[in-house]
Amino acid sequence: MPRALITGITGQDGLYLSELLLSKGYEVYGLIRGQNNPKLELVRHTVPGVHLVTGDLTDMSSLLRALNVAQPDEVYNLGAISFVAYSWDNAHVTSDVTGQGVLNILEAIRLYAGDDLGKVRFYQASSSEMFGKVQEVPQRESTLLWPRSPYGVAKVFGHYMTINYRESYGMHASSGILFNHESPRRGPEFVTRKVTQAVARIKLGLQDDITMGNLDAKRDWGFAGDYVEAMWRMLQQDEADDYVVATGETHSIRELLDVAFNRIGIDEWQSYVKQDPRFMRPAEVELLIGDPAKAQEKLGWKPKVGFEELVTMMVDNDLVEQRALAGI
Ligand code: GDP
């Protein structure tokens, strides 16, 4: 039975990846941070088959201990402070966790595996935010990185450190450059979920409007459940490598609003949407669109859920959830 250790087990991707690996017969371990982590119950409830180990990406001895407990064949590093807007006000902690944390886990694997480094395969959750002020359209594996936030800079560090461990030590370390991926499990601070939650609440009469930032930014949004499949496929290859994982389509925040409001029968959403500079960013990533050709060709991976289906799925889920929360 293959064994996997996942950092970031409490996040959207940690949960989907756990479900995927459990369905494939893996013994799955999840690293969980902090005392009384409020997401502990969510993980226990959603993926009861996962064994939890306490630890923190900023604490290398806890990582070594977790590796000794899990004895993994595969390590998926999904743990990060992942909200871009937060990273300007918390640049140091973002660098420590999202950037240095990658080095910590790579070093911990090297110490744990000793002479037998080939026994552990490593996946690093890299991000399309690394492309930032994009130097090429669409973005591919070879596109020059130009991050636009402390989060993006930290992810670039982790990406190159992963490549460096592959090249220096021959580690089977792959970096998945995942474009934005969403689901009903997405945190409500991200724009898709913020919109679908608000739209559901407007429909139910629980809220009058929504306050947003820049409506012109464009993103390549896919479904997180599809994207964890690409992570797993990367670690099944003979050779480790880097892959862009994206849909190859881009949509603006306005189009997101179009689809979400349309689902509740509103075509003209302008009167429901306010804008506030509070939600604007010091530097914006204006346009992301990925070229997933390499992932398609080498991994045989293709996204299954399209943009409209994704947004509709999220609105429908939020209608059920908000109704239950409000007791109506
Ligand atoms: P990101 O691509 O990782 O930063 O994912 P987000 O979902 O946080 O943001 C996607 C885009 O939506 C960015 O260009 C934001 O500037 C834009 N956006 C516009 N209004 C909002 C908002 O109210 N909240 C968030 N999170 N993003 C917003």
Image (cartoon, rainbow, N blue to C red):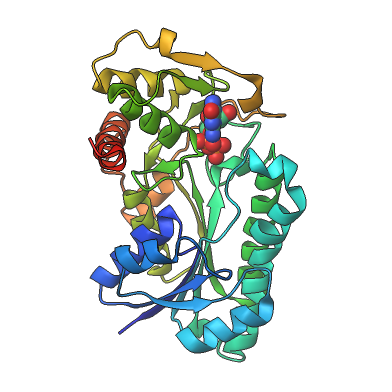
Tell me where residue 89 appears, x and y as whole percent: 74, 42
Farthest residue in the bottom direction? 115
Q: Residue at x 29, y 23 (%)?
A: 203
Image location (x, y in percent) of residue 70: 46, 84
Which quarter of the image is occupied by the N terminus? bottom left
Please state the total of marks drawn on the protein image.
0
Q: Is residue 21 above or below residue 213?
A: below
Q: Is residue 282 above or below residue 241?
A: above
Residue appearing at x 55%, y 61% in the figure? 79
Left or right: 79, with 44 as reference point = right
- 121 or 263, which lies in front? 263
Residue 259, quarter of picture: top left
Report the front residue among 323 and 288.
Answer: 323
Q: Is residue 48 left or right of residue 162?
A: left
Q: In this view, which residue lies farthest toward the right?
A: 92
From what the image shows, is residue 177 above or below residue 97?
A: above
Q: Tell me if residue 233 can be seen.
A: no
User: In the drawing, does residue 211 fall left or right of residue 17?
Assistant: right
Image quarter for ligand 1 equals: top right
Mark yes or no: residue 216 visible.
yes
| Quadrant in the picture for residue 106 | bottom right
Q: Would you identify the image quadrant in which residue 311 lies?
A: top left
Q: Residue at x 72, y 56 (%)?
A: 93
The image position of residue 305, as x and y in percent, is: 27, 40
Quarter the C terminus occupies: top left
